[in-house]
């Protein structure tokens, strides 16, 4: 699981893996990217840059994002590019790019089972503060039957 700037670190690890000629191999059963402070086009970049080849290292990739994440809104203002954890990945609704068998892209903006503003960074911590999001992550980790893939709303 990578949270916030941990997504940035994961992207550098994936890019480094392939830039050193290492082969595609299943390193992870599932990669969880929660509230990712990473470029929203990271999966689309050429030449094995950033997260573009994460799917070659993980059997499944789950991305959790929320436009109500205030920290990532501020990151957008500083970096001048949309953030993965704020907007979700570019072309997130394209099942050709993000097949449901391999990707889960969860819009968490409507999750309301926690106090969004207390403490001040709560909107950036929904992946651990919301019972609904935690339950979804646990179900994904357990490979629960019938768990939807593709673009979903929590």
Image (cartoon, rainbow, N blue to C red):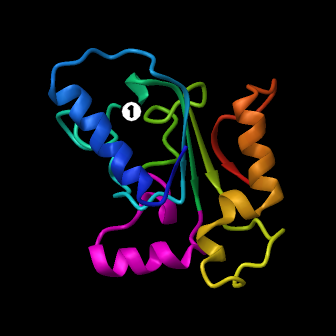
Picture residue at 45% right of the left edge, 21% below the top: 27
Asked if the stretch drawn in magenta spans residue 78, the answer is yes
Picture residue at 67% right of the left edge, 67% below the top: 109
Residue 37 placement (x, y as % from top left): 42, 62
- As drawn, is 92 to the left or to the right of 50? right
Residue 134 placement (x, y as % from top left): 76, 50
Asked if the stretch drawn in magenta spans residue 69, the answer is yes
* 79 in relation to 28, above or below: below
| Residue count near mark 1 (Cα–Cα under 10 Å), binned few <14, some 14–19, many ≥20 | many
- As drawn, is 6 to the left or to the right of 131? left
Residue 25 placement (x, y as % from top left): 38, 15
* 72 in relation to 87, above or below: below
Is residue 90 shown to the viewer in this render? no
Place residue 141 in its image quadrant: top right
- How many dots with numbers? 1
**What secondary structure is marked by label 1?**
helix
Which image quarter is the C terminus in?
Answer: bottom right
Which residue occupies the foreground of this view, 3 or 96? 3
Picture residue at 47% right of the left edge, 57% below the top: 36
Is residue 1 shown to the viewer in this render? yes
Which image quarter is the N terminus in?
Answer: top right
* 34 in relation to 27, above or below: below
Place residue 15 in its image quadrant: top left
- As drawn, is 15 to the left or to the right of 11? left
- Residues in magenta, as a range: 66-89
- As drawn, is 127 to the left or to the right of 99? right
Picture residue at 39% right of the left edge, 32% below the top: 54
Residue behind mark 1: 54
């Amino acid at each position: 699981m990578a949270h916030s700037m941990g997504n940035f670190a994961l992207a550098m690890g994936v890019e480094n893996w392939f830039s050193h000629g290492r082969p595609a191999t299943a390193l992870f059963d599932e990669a969880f990217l929660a509230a990712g402070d990473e470029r929203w086009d990271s999966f689309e970049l050429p030449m094995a840059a950033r997260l573009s080849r994460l799917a070659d290292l993980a059997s499944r990739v789950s991305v959790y994002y929320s436009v109500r994440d205030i920290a990532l809104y501020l990151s957008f203002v500083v970096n001048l590019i949309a953030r993965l954890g704020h907007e979700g990945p570019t072309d997130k609704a394209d099942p050709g790019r993000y097949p449901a068998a391999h990707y889960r892209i969860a819009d968490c903006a409507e999750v309301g089972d926690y106090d969004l503003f207390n403490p001040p960074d709560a909107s950036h911590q929904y992946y651990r503060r919301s019972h609904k999001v935690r339950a979804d992550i646990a179900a994904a980790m357990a490979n629960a039957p019938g768990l939807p893939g593709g673009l979903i709303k929590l």
